[in-house]
Image (cartoon, rainbow, N blue to C red):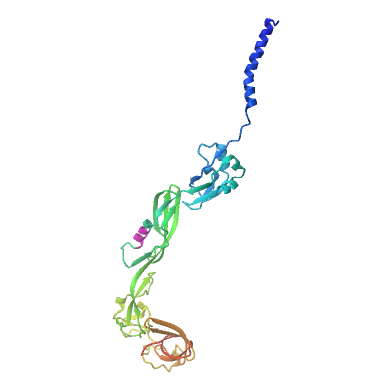
Amino acid sequence: MINSTGKTILSSVILLTLAVLPGKLQAATSEPSSPARATLKSSALVSQSEIKADCLIKADCNSEFRNELANIHLGVIPDPLGELVISETELRNKLGKMSGRLDLPKKVVIRRQGAFLKSTDVIAKIKTICNPDQNPNIEIDTSRIPNNIILPGNLQSWALSANSDNRLGMRLFSLTAETDGGKFRQLVQVSVVKIIEAAELTRLAKPGELISSEMIGKKRVELKSEQANLPMRYEDVVGKYLARYKSAGTILRSTDLAKDAENVCKTKNGNLPRKTSNFSNNRENWVVKPGEEVEFHFANGTLNLNFPARAMEGGQVGDQINLINLKNQKKVQGVITEKGRVEYAKN
């Protein structure tokens, strides 16, 4: 028989056992916990060029995953609006051991943020700067400007400024923009020309000749600079006198003209260039000597040829001499127009 003291002790043991037993049973029956896992997204939008794996993790993912993935480099998207496509196999290789704790998609597409600046807006601004008076004879080649200029973020403001003061020729502009993705700067180049109808000789002309519409034609010329002695317009040379010998196809310039028939280029002895076909006997004044190789220019209509020839006779500017065409060894005649150059002229 158990006395009252024994009963008290036994009750205490039973109560203690019942309190501890559920915890032990639960610990005994529970399995070891598995490592945490996460699922990667199949697409992402980034703002930077360097791509890290943490861009594919969901926002509610724990910080441990995020920190580990932030140290894994996936690739580079150098241009705004560009994209990076990674297959499951390639992604697994880049993630290494980390891939065992992640659920991977079959393919990942990562795109970089960006925006467009329309080229039409830029071109309109350039034309306003280059041709403020809207001169129809000014032409601006904007073919070097891309159709759309890609910006690193959404456009907030932009400006265009000229980097040079020249009005014709190649012009360089600086395009700057403020975006929510940072500042943007790009150089833009255009070509600006002025179109004129220049006077072009249709035949060999001699000093002192009065220029008429029968001896010149109109030729479209692009002026690419504002330097001195530019080609002259057709209407500005009619009725002027020629100052020196000029061959067919020559575009006339201001230095080719004389104020009157007497104000023409003279020879070394101060006389007007000879207009006869007889050559000079004064060898000291000869600019072409017998046996010398010269350039022979032949012009007839639209045909213009240059070939080497050897002078059979000597003379000064304006003299007509006989030569040998070194291409076919045939005899030709021409008028000396300058040292080392002879031109064919119809009689």
Q: Which residue is at 62% across, 43% downward?
A: 97
From this view, report whether residue 230 is shown above or below residue 5: below
Which of the image's four quarters has the C terminus?
A: bottom left
Percent position of residue 50, x then y: 53, 49
Q: Quadrant of residue 300?
A: bottom left
Outermost residue on the right side: it is: 1
Q: Choose between 107 and 272: the one closer to the eye.
A: 107
From this view, report whether residue 202 is shown above or below residue 74: below
In the picture, measured across the screen, residue 39 lies left or right of residue 23, that is left
Q: Choose between 26 and 59: the one closer to the eye.
A: 26
Percent position of residue 114, x then y: 45, 50
Q: Quadrant of residue 285?
A: bottom left
Q: Which residue is at 58% across, 45% downward?
A: 72
Is residue 128 found inside the magenta-colored segment of the image? yes
In the picture, measured across the screen, residue 10 lies left or right of residue 260, that is right
Percent position of residue 83, x then y: 49, 51
Q: Choose between 258 and 56: the one closer to the eye.
A: 56
Q: Which residue is at 56% across, 39% downward?
A: 65
Q: How many marks?
A: 0
Which of the image's four quarters has the N terminus?
A: top right
Is residue 6 found inside the magenta-colored segment of the image? no
In the picture, measured across the screen, residue 30 lies left or right of residue 297, that is right
Classified by dominant secondary structure, the portion drawn in magenta counts as helix
Q: Which residues are magenta?
A: 123-130
